[in-house]
Image: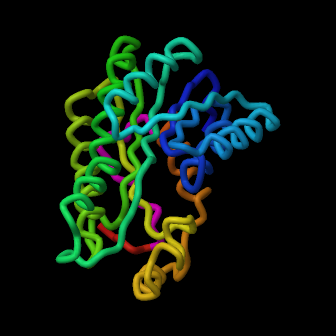
Amino acid sequence: MRLEGRTILITGAATGIGRATALAMADAGAGVVINHLAQEDLALALLDEITLRGGRAWTIGADVSNAQEVSQMMKHLANTCPAIDTLVHNAGIIQEKPFLDTTEADWDRMLAIDLKSAFLMARAVLPGMLAKGRGNLINIASDLGIIGRAHFAPYCSAKAGVIGLTKSLALEFAPHIRVNAIAPGPVATAMLSPESMSAQTLALELDIPQRRFAHPNEIASTAVFLASELSGFYTGQVLGPNGGSVMP
């Protein structure tokens, strides 16, 4: 699964799954663009780590739920790095809250960061990919976008929307642009910790056949596969490194 000559933009790449994916893509030979939001120190540390490992990387701060910032980011990247071959759209947030306590502001924020951003990023990178006659979009969704969960209605709705967007774009831009999604199960990141989740939710996450959380590297390896030529006949698919939480 070698990726020499590719330039891969990863949103939300300073921590968690995004960070692991950036390292894995760089180790496979790709140049990596590290998008972050107000995490410059972490992004620069990741850039240094990739460089020390012999890779190529760039960093760019932008709120990918904001159309103007996305546009400015793409203009900057057009002048600083090779054209983007692959987008891994990973940026997102999660919130646990009873539905009747969920405010309109909660809903709007979740849908903006977890779903609108996928629309904005796809719209930003597709013209360049179409001009080259090839490209690859990989959206990070969630198993909860498939199965749902109490107290996570906005998050589940947004991630289900990401899956729907993935399938629609796969149909519209085939055969030269491939669009797939990864729907992880529970992953050992800050988003799934006692500080951000209730004990009841953490217990639910562990109640899967594998009886453990995934390591971010296990999600990153799926992204490398989808970025590589080994997945050349995959489009419109939702891959599930989920420990058995979903069995279609």
Q: Is residue 78 left or right of residue 41?
A: left
Image quarter where the N terminus lies is top right
Q: Is residue 233 above or below residue 79?
A: below
Q: How is the image coloured?
A: rainbow
Asked if residue 239 lies in the magenta stretch, the reply is yes
Q: Report whether residue 230 is seen.
A: no
Residue 233, position as x, y percentages in the image: 38, 37
Give residue 95's quadrant in the image.
Answer: bottom left
Q: Which residue is at a point 49% across and 65% down the rendered structure image?
A: 191
Residue 190, position as x, y percentages in the image: 55, 65
Residue 64, position as x, y percentages in the image: 39, 38
Residue 204, position as x, y percentages in the image: 41, 84
Which of the two residues, 10 or 215, is positioned nearer the viewer here? Answer: 10
Q: Which residue is at a point 73% across and 42% down the rendered structure image?
A: 45
Q: Is residue 137 left or right of residue 34?
A: left
Q: Is residue 242 left or right of residue 155?
A: right
Q: Which residue is at a point 73% across and 31% down the rendered structure image?
A: 55
- What secondary structure do most residues of the magenta stretch adopt? loop
Q: Is residue 197 above or below residue 24?
A: below
The residue sitting at the right extreme is: 52
Q: Is residue 175 above or below residue 65?
A: above
Image quarter where the C terminus lies is bottom left
Q: Which residues are magenta?
A: 229-243
Q: Which residue is at a point 24% across and 58% down the rendered structure image?
A: 105
